[in-house]
Amino acid sequence: MAESELDSKLFTAMQTGEPLKGYKKTILGRVFCTVLNPFDGKPEGIILFGNPNSNDPSTMVYVWNNAQDVYFRRINKKALETGTIIECKVPEMVKDIIPEPYAAATDEELDVILKSPYMSLLAALNKCKSDVVLNRFLNRARVLEKSEKIIKVIEGRISETQFGEVVSKIEYEK
């Protein structure tokens, strides 16, 4: 098989989001591993960090073809033998990319949610992870002149998401 044909198959696999195999770190600390860069074929060091008990992408590394897999297994043999890095099934690792709820919602759809019963509104807000979407809720609540209680709840949810990001960045940088 020609090298250009191999490259085209590799790039197609990368764009469809279907890696050949995946590996995940198992410890809370940072783990250094070496992979072949899929674009230029040169070795490249990466650091896996984050909580291995989550589906955090920073805890995982993917290989897209057999050459990368063989290289990864040979170079990172000690980490694989000690269990610092383990092979994971691809469906387990590649979570479906779930779009942010209400990210594409129109102002009218947000208005309907804001006018819903209080507990339904809380459930909708708790699904949101993005400050952008929550700020849209806040702006619509102000336009609709919602109660101070609802505005405070939305502001609280915004600060929760911002605080969560700060905590996770501090936790992972240690």
Image (cartoon, grey):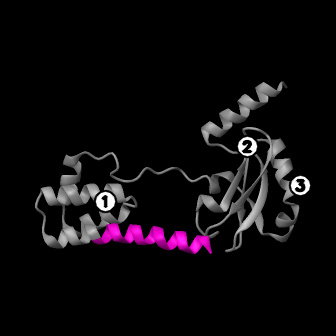
Q: At x 68% / y 63%, what residue is drawn?
A: 48
Q: Position of residue 102 (x, y in %)?
A: 33, 52
Q: Amino acid at mark 1?
A: Leu
- First to last magenta residue range: 156-174
Q: At x 73% / y 41%, what residue is drawn?
A: 38
Q: Nearer the viewer, residue 73 or 118?
A: 73
Q: Please, is residue 52 above or below residue 3 in the view?
A: below
- Which label belongs to residue 25? none
- Which label belongs to residue 74? 3
- Mark 2–mark 3 CB contact (< 8 Å): no
- Which label belongs to residue 64? 2
Q: Position of residue 16 (x, y in %)?
A: 61, 38
Q: Is residue 56 magenta?
A: no
CA gap, disc 3 and disc 1: 46 Å
- Which label belongs to residue 134? 1
Work out whether mark 3 precedes mark 1 in sequence or the reverse, and give the earlier one.
Answer: 3
Q: Nearer the viewer, mark 2 or mark 1?
A: 1
Q: Amino acid at mark 2?
A: Trp
CA gap, disc 2 and disc 3: 16 Å
- Mark 3–mark 1 CB contact (< 8 Å): no
Work out whether mark 2 precedes mark 3 in sequence or the reverse, and give the earlier one.
Answer: 2
Residue 2, located in which quarter of the rendered image?
Answer: top right
Q: How many neighbours does mark 1 have within 10 angstroms: few (below 14), some (14-19), or many (20 or more)?
A: many
Q: Position of residue 47 (x, y in %)?
A: 70, 61
Work out whether mark 2 precedes mark 1 in sequence or the reverse, and give the earlier one.
Answer: 2
In the structure shown, which secondary structural element does the residue marked by tag 2 occupy? loop
Q: Amino acid at mark 3?
A: Arg
Q: How many neighbours does mark 3 have within 10 angstroms: few (below 14), some (14-19), or many (20 or more)?
A: few
Main SS of the magenta part reads: helix
Q: Please, is residue 174 above or below residue 125 in the view?
A: below
Q: Position of residue 132 (x, y in %)?
A: 34, 55
* Residue at the limit of the structure toward the left, as seen here: 145
